[in-house]
Image (cartoon, coloured by chain):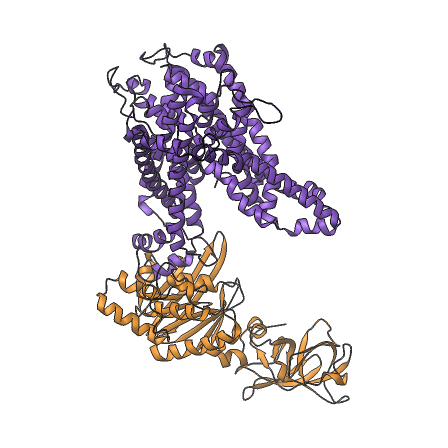
Amino acid sequence: MRQGRGQEVALAAAVAVAIAVFSLLPMLRLVRETVAPAGALSPAVIEAGLASRATWVATLNSLVVGIGGTVLAVSLGTLVALVVTLTDMRARAPFILCFVMPLMIAPQVTALSWLQLFGPASPFLKLIGLAPPLGSRNPLHSPGGIVLLLGIQYAPLVFLLVRAGLRRLPRELVEAARAAGAGRFTVLATVVLPLMTPSIMAAAALAFVSCVGNFGIPAFLGIPANYPVLPTLIYQRLAGGGPAVLGEAAFLSVLIGMIAMAGIVAQERMSRRRDYRSFASSLTSKPYALGRWRPAVEAAMWALIVAILVLPLTGLVLSSLVPGYGIPLSAATATLDNYRFVLVEHAASRRAFANSLGLSLTAAAFAVLAALPIAYLVAWGRQRWVRMVNLSIELPYALPGVVLAIAALLLFLRPLPLTGLHIYNTVWIILYAYLARFLVLAVRPAVSGFHQIDRALEEAAQVAGAGLFSRLRSVVFPLVAPAAMAGGLLIFMTAFGELTVSALLWSSGAETIGVVMFSFEQGGDSKYAAAISAVTVAVTFALMLATNLAARRLPSGVLPWRD
Amino acid sequence: MARLKLAGVTKTFSGFDAVRDVSLEVADGEFLAVLGPSGCGKTTLLRLVAGFEQPSAGEIAIGGTVVAGAGVSVPPEKRRVGIVFQNYALWPHMSVAQNVGYALKVAKVPREEARRRVAEALALVDLDGFADRYPASLSGGQRQRVALARCLVAAPSLVLFDEPLANLDVHLRAAMEAEFSAFHRRTGTTMIYITHDQAEAMALADRIAVMDGGRLVQVADPRTLYREPATEMVAAFIGQGMVLPATVLSGEERGRCRVAVLGQEATVRCRPGERARQGAAVCCRAADLEPVAPGEAGLEVAVRRAVYKGGATRVEVSPLADPSLALHVEGDDAGHSGRFEPGARLCLRIRSGWLIPGASA
């Protein structure tokens, strides 16, 4: 018995160390830089930040696009969730796969696709003869464009949460209303939507945090339009001033963090007032028969997919095939040279593919290994502190990516104490940031995997005399491994085209795909950026389809794009 | 006038008949219980009447109007039925008054009148003063009463109960039974009550419709159902009836006939016009089997098990002539005498019973 406890303590200690290193340490370092820049408490950084006009402009802009993007994402995501879940629309699974796709595509790729679709050089508009004259302004280089793309990027997030809520809605609540004489739309307005408000508000909070922290979209759309938001302001300051302006960057990132937290806290507050712990559900509602409207509704839904997914990606692929800026695309001019250039010829770009592949694989593998014991303690552990600590794993992911990037910079600017190891300006600092930021993506599915397993399986092994480590290895982990691996896959897909964190942490020789693609676009080489993006989208889509084939062995709800 | 009429109603789910050729008439103001084991199709029947399912064949009419069948399909919101669900299905985001008044709001009843009718409905179920509470703060019985008030406030032509007491504890059940019963007397509404609990059905209903395997097996008042089950299934399902193989020796005479059961002759009740036949079946209740002194003529049985029931003992026995048959008789409180030890022999006399019409065991 004593031996068993010893192993338990060892496991808990290891988890505690991992969480401290990857979650608490960077956050604390960031806060210290803001309130006590030179080691002593001082309001200097905060005062300087508040006095700057740029701070206020970027904050206001962040709020505008954050709220605008959230409103759009919530409206679109909720509407689609209602139609998909409550009606007898056909071909639901492929529709969900397509609708969730934008969430899996890196934001800067979304931005580039749309820019290519609407820009004056758009091969697509040229093909149909609608292209504006060269040199005219791309309509997406505007706050409206940022709001539009943020809304499309995060509508799937809202969709997933609202759909999950709708599927828990007990059938009787709807039927009772219909028996009381209410028609479909009355039921929707008086029963379904009010009961969905907690789900919708939670989704709105998440979408708001994502919109405010998004870097790729405002970087591609806002920087050319001279419309700074907080993440792009930080990037521009650091790109111009280097480590000297870290204090100011730290202040700005704490500011974003606070805005994001305000969104989450507001949602928590409102949800608590409307806590409808519903009765245990029996069955989900029978779908509304659309009747003769069914073809029209289905056509509208697929038209939406064409508009938000097919057209932009077509624009992206077409752009990657043109030989030069403004040249019309035809069978004669189309070329694969751009792909050859980014995959073979361009040294930095070639290196970036290797770096991103290595980084995302390592991050995914490590996160899966770490997630199993963490999730075990979170789901089944008896230590109360672990559950509290679960929140701190969520934090680096819940907060915008720039926050974590700045924290990592501050942590590793100087060599590590004692060892003298210097990881600043290497890929290792990016790896550290990826691990800290994405760990939760593997922990969450693993926790839900644990919740779907009968604990008695472990207890049976315990009764049979197996110690903690041996029963974890032989019984528990094999059962949860598929869920954690699915989480690892999410990490791989997210990290592979990642830009927000690496844009601040990269250095020559330690580029990532996102960074190279960003610099191509900033240098005016959209065709190369498009080629890189097309490759990442292809990889993402292939992985989604491949995992769908293996999805039957995964616990339900692990793969977001699968019903 | 029949308030509810089903004619040849069948509901097929992917090749499986959940409800098969059910014809039934419920009179205005009648309280009908639909009773059957789980999976017998009774809930499907209720959903067909409410309009949540469409019959595959047959016709349903409420108050003389066809609501389903032959190209007609009236949606649930136009059928004017009230439903009390097993899990109450109160809307958690609405207060008690809002829950009860929902149907009136949907029907755009003027606010003053709606308020008055909600207050009346709440008074009817003894919930005055609860109008502003939310369902989460009510007890199970109170929720059930809110559900009751909610379905009655719109004066529906028909009220459907879907196992409304299944989630309540035993004590509350008895109280709610009394309440439903009083409620039916006061309002005179036609009620259809789905349940798998025969005691509930017996206590409440004017008539009971027994379902099995999607079919309607017997529709009768509780006393007839108990005394004169139409099939072996009803005999076994109601009141733990024992079904014994029998040979009818004489034709019916003043409602009785002579039968031979496992070599013992007995007189049992029967339908008019029964004739002597082989392969018949008799339904006996525990009270119909009476222990007699050893040596007297009777059915010899061996005790298998005695279960003390508090105040009485249920003694499970098997006839020596056919050990595969399981019978049970009521023993007295005194289990200590050793009479009911497993393996002990008893001798039983068949005092009475009911000849199951047309069936064989």
- Is residue A267 rendered to the left or right of residue A121? right
Q: From the viewer's side, name the closer residue of B257 and B241.
A: B241
Q: Residue A61 sits in which quadrant?
A: top left
Give residue B313's position: percent from left, percent from top: 67, 81
* Up-down relation of residue B88 to residue A343 (above or below): below
* Up-down relation of residue A415 to residue B297 (above or below): above
Q: Colour of chain A?
A: purple
Give residue B33's position: percent from left, percent from top: 45, 72
Give residue B351's position: percent from left, percent from top: 64, 87
* Up-down relation of residue A222 to residue B183 (above or below): above
Q: From the viewer's side, name the closer residue of A288 and A152.
A: A152
Q: From the viewer's side, name the closer residue of A60 and B164.
A: A60
Q: Residue A118 sits in which quadrant?
A: top left
Query: Which chain wears orange?
Result: B
- Is residue B89 rendered to the left or right of residue B78? right
* Up-down relation of residue B107 to residue B340 (above or below): above
Give residue A273's position: percent from left, percent from top: 38, 55
